[in-house]
Structure formats: C-alpha cells, structure tokens
Image (tube, helix red, strand yellow):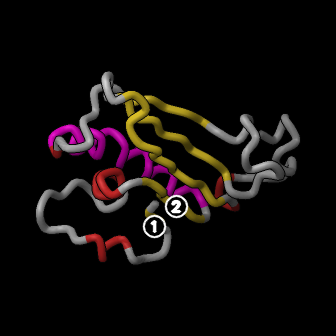
Amino acid sequence: MVMKGELPPTSSVSQSTVLLRGDGVVDGWTKVYHLSWLIGEVKRPRSPDNCMDFLLGNIDEGNPIHWGIVSQRLLPAINHVRAAAADVITVGDGAFLFAVERGFTHANTALGAFNQPGVAGL
C-alpha cells in the first residue's frame, strides 16, 4: 500500500488501525466465508489495494464446532496483529464476533459482551 501511494512512506503497523471484516457466507451451497483485513488510514478506503482477502470453506453459520475451528485458526493471527497495530477493530455478524473477537464460547457469552472499544457489529 505504501508503494501504491495509499499510505505515506513512513507508515508502520504500530500507527495503523486494522479492521478485520467477516462478511458472511458467500455461497449458501458451498458455505464459503469471506474475510478481509483493511487498513483504516489509507487515502482511498474502498480501493482494491486496501484489502487482503481470505476465504474459509465449509463453514456453517449454525454449527458451533465450525466456529470453534475458525476461532482456533484466527485468534493467534488477530492477537499478533493486535500486538503490533495501534488498534484492531472486528466487524461482522454475531457468529463471527463470538468466534474471533471474544474467543469461541457456546452458551455463556451474551451480545452485551460486544459493547466494548474495538468491537463493531453489523
């Protein structure tokens, strides 16, 4: 993004706000879930240069075991970015927030747990 002119040459992750977006099941038949990492300080937020996309396959939004797997795979990476970035904001549906922002829990986490800085629900 620095080379594309979207960020100043002196930019670093420690000065950035990073957004992790989970935008739901892309295809109801294949159950593919689409994730994006975005940087908040870019000149053109909707630019295709401001997006690192990932696809997770065979995720059923109603299956807590699948979301547990998402949590195990994503939380280490999110925690790594959170340690390096100025702020990390997670945006997504309820199941996504349960899995990756709060850690995977089944019955003991209420939606009120998301009412904290750095968490935004759609």
Q: Is residue 77 above or below residue 31?
A: below
Q: Residue at x 53, y 60 (%)?
A: 88
Q: Nearer the viewer, residue 30 or 42?
A: 30
Q: Position of residue 33 (x, y in %)?
A: 39, 34
Name the residue tied to disc 1.
Answer: 119
Q: Residue at x 68, y 57 (%)?
A: 40
Number of numbered discs? 2
Q: Residue at x 63, y 60 (%)?
A: 17
Q: Residues within 10 Å of mark 1 (few under 14, many from 20)?
A: some
Q: Position of residue 16 (x, y in %)?
A: 67, 58
In the rendered structure, find residue 51 and report the number of the disc placed on it: none
| Residue 4 among magenta residues | no
**Which of the two labelled residues, at mark 1 and mark 2, occupies the earlier sequence position?**
2
Q: Residue at x 77, y 52 (%)?
A: 42
In the displayed orientation, state which residue is furthest to the front: 28
Task: Identify the element where label 2 is drawn.
Answer: strand
Tell me: 92 left or right of 19.
left
Q: Is residue 40 above or below residue 7?
A: below
Tell me: 101 left or right of 47.
left
Task: Identify the element where label 1 is drawn.
Answer: strand
Q: Nearer the viewer, residue 103 or 84?
A: 103
Q: Position of residue 110 (x, y in %)?
A: 22, 71
Magenta-highlighted residues: 65-85
Name the residue tied to disc 2.
Answer: 89
**What type is the residue that disc 2 sits on?**
Ile
Q: Are marks 1 and 2 in contact (CB under 8 Å)?
A: yes
